Amino acid sequence: MLVKSFLRGLLFVVPVAATVYVLWWLFVKIDNLFDTRAWFGFHVPGLGVACTVVGVTLVGLLASNILTRWAVNLMDRVFQRLPLAKVFYSSIRDLMEAFVGERRNLHSPVIVSLGEIGGEALGFITRDDLAWLDRKDSVAVYFPQSYNFAGSVVIFPKERVTPVRAESRAVMQFIVSGGVSG
């Protein structure tokens, strides 16, 4: 009974402690972006976070202003032309747009049958038209990974793998962005 209570306690304490730790770590990292000691002679807790929130909000206001829209478009064009940065910039931009932008793409949740395995997976349709991949009767489904910021390597028999006639860079950008880029 004591072991069972301990394990039940762990089920409560570990997620709470991990969440508090991650939030604290993020708060401290953002707070340390601004050196309040240099400004006031002492540390002002939370001022860095407040400055970051205000700064990001101001950038958002400027980005939506007609007078400064040209600067945003110029920066966008520059990043779109840089060879390596283009893949990361456009993928991250499109992924952020899918979650918080005006054209949110992750609004079609689906359950996908995994066929012979007998399981099902939850995901979001990100593209209805995949003609550019010679898949007119297919859709792109994004499967978010819980507690993970990476991908998976899955091994299939050769006869189950079909080559794609598309540029590798375009396919990588499509994958990195969760299917919302391109």
Image: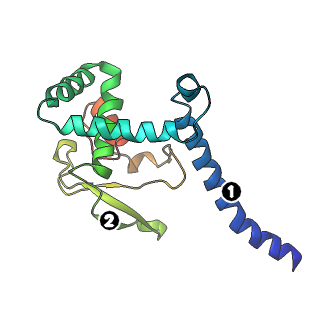
Q: Position of residue 34 (x, y in %)?
A: 51, 29
| Amino acid type assigned to the residue bearing label 2 in the image | Pro
Q: Quadrant of the C terminus?
A: top left
Task: Say which element carries label 1.
Answer: helix
Q: Work out whether residue 159 can be spotted.
A: yes
Q: Which residue is at 32% across, 41% downward?
A: 57
On the image, which quarter does residue 9 sit in? bottom right
Mark 1 vs mark 2, CA separation in Å: 31 Å
- Asked whether the residues under the numbered discs 1 and 2 touch, taking CB atoms below 8 Å apart as contact, a structural biologist would say no
Q: Seen in the image, is 166 located left or right of residue 92?
A: left
Residue 17 — which label?
A: 1
Q: Seen in the image, is 27 located left or right of residue 9?
A: left
Which residue occupies the foreground of this view, 180 or 156?
180
| Amino acid type assigned to the residue bearing label 1 in the image | Ala
Which residue occupies the foreground of this view, 118 or 6?
6
Q: Seen in the image, is 49 located left or right of residue 127?
A: right
Q: Work out whether residue 163 can be spotted.
A: no
Q: Position of residue 131 (x, y in %)?
A: 16, 47
Label 1: few (<14), some (14–19) or many (≥20) C-alpha neighbours in 10 Å = few
Q: Which residue is at 19% across, 57% downward?
A: 137
Q: Position of residue 24 (x, y in %)?
A: 61, 46
Residue 109 — which label?
A: 2
**Above-or-below relation of 47 to 19:** above
Q: Position of residue 45 (x, y in %)?
A: 58, 40
